Amino acid sequence: MARKYFSQKRVLVTGGAGFLGSHLIDRLIEQGDEVLCVDNLFTGTKSNIAHMIGHPRFEFMRHDICFPLFVEVDLIYNLACPASPIHYQHDPVQTTKVSVIGSINMLGLAKRLDARILQASTSEIYGDPVEHPQTESYWGNVNSIGQRSCYDEGKRCAETLFFDYHRQHGLPIKVARIFNTYGPRMHPADGRVVSNFIMQALRGDDITIYGDGGQTRSFCYVDDLVQGLMKLMESAEGFTGPVNIGNPVEFTIQELAEIVVELTGSRSKLVRRPLPSDDPTQRRPDIDLARRELGWEPAVSLREGLVPTIKYFADLAC
Ligand code: NAD
Ligand code: UDP
Ligand code: UDP
């Protein structure tokens, strides 16, 4: 009998030593799955998965998915890709490669195994959107030659590959468009707004608001996000997405700075810095499709989620 009919599943998580991947692995192990974590440790760390080492249902393999991978699994979560602008712009050619060549390898693996495969896509697919909020039917407004393009266009091409493997080879795919997510195990120095503001507030340094602070983002707590990904993986056979997974409550960057200062009790001052190029001015997911198809919506408010996140960063600093 094919292995997939046993209740215990063998799950491959690429990028499993990263922020989102390590939380996903915690939940998969909790529900009784066997997990193979494949990561080249470019931005991920062994400390994110240290608590799993030695677990009988957990295995770690150091591997770059730009190279073929021959393993036997039932489900694949493809999360491998640097996610923050500082990291993905460090080696932009490698960033495009991991989304394009890495995805081809993981799709080839899924095809050989007839395994269900989920792609961690991104709200960056929408670029600097001219439609607001963004629904999945919006095609986006992306610069193909800018500094963010290696990430945005790489992820767009990965979506194309997923849908072509689905149409051409009947591969069971799921595509999640993830919006800004935060929580414990974020990189303290990844230059992203939540980690920057918390670290600056904890150190008493100036809080650096790029531009006038009027640009918006919506921030999803990591536990909510992981639950959304798992519900998508378990969704009906015919449902491929793409589906937005994010928190629809929108904050300006100025508001975020003020909340972080309040929750940390910091004396930091808010200061202005130049806005990076191609920085989207507004971003908020329309999550009606996720509500309807997955019965999912976020449960954790920004203030609630920031408390454990601040604690994580404060513990790191000790
Ligand atoms: P992260 O940088 O913490 O995790 C990415 C992981 O992928 C790291 O462990 C890294 O070492 C690994 N990796 C990178 N290149 C690899 C390669 N070639 N082979 C094997 N492993 C490789 O980032 P994250 O925030 O956990 O993001 C996970 C996924 O979710 C990414 O695909 C990202 O694009 C997507 N995403 C994240 C967010 C967010 O807000 N965090 C938003 C949208 C999309
Ligand atoms: N691949 C892999 N593991 C597998 C099967 C395939 O890494 O178990 C890689 C393989 O290197 C190939 C890619 O996936 O380059 C795409 O595979 P596919 O079968 O779609 O294409 P082809 O092998 O015909 O180029
Ligand atoms: N940002 C900021 N100060 C910082 C870091 C980021 O004002 O120290 C702004 C940034 O210009 C952007 C928003 O916060 O408008 C979110 O940036 P992030 O890099 O976290 O994510 P992304 O732009 O990919 O959504």
Image (spheres, grey):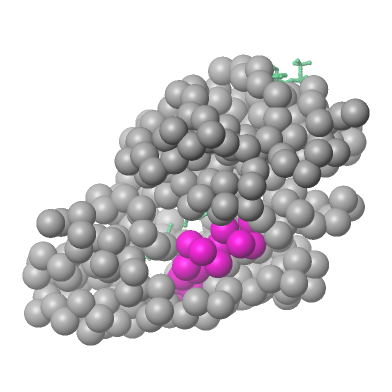
User: Dividing the image into four equal quarters, which quarter contains ligand 3?
Assistant: bottom left
Percent x, y of residue 60: 48, 29
Res 164 → quadrant: top right
Is residue 296 toward the left or the right of residue 181 in the image?
A: right
Q: Does the magenta stretch include residue 285?
A: no
Residue shown at the point (68%, 35%) measured from the top left: 10
Q: In this view, does 134 lie above or below 33?
A: below
Q: Is residue 181 above or below residue 238?
A: below
Residue shown at the point (48%, 37%) measured from the top left: 55
Is residue 65 toward the left or the right of residue 251 in the image?
A: right
Name the one closer to the observer, 272 or 113: 113
Q: Does the magenta stretch include residue 220?
A: yes
Q: In this view, does 189 lie above or below 263?
A: above
Name the one closer to the observer, 76 or 101: 76
Percent x, y of residue 16: 50, 40
Q: Magenta segment, which residues?
A: 213-229
Percent x, y of residue 258: 26, 82
Name the one closer to the observer, 31 or 316: 31
Is residue 29 toward the left or the right of residue 85 in the image?
A: right
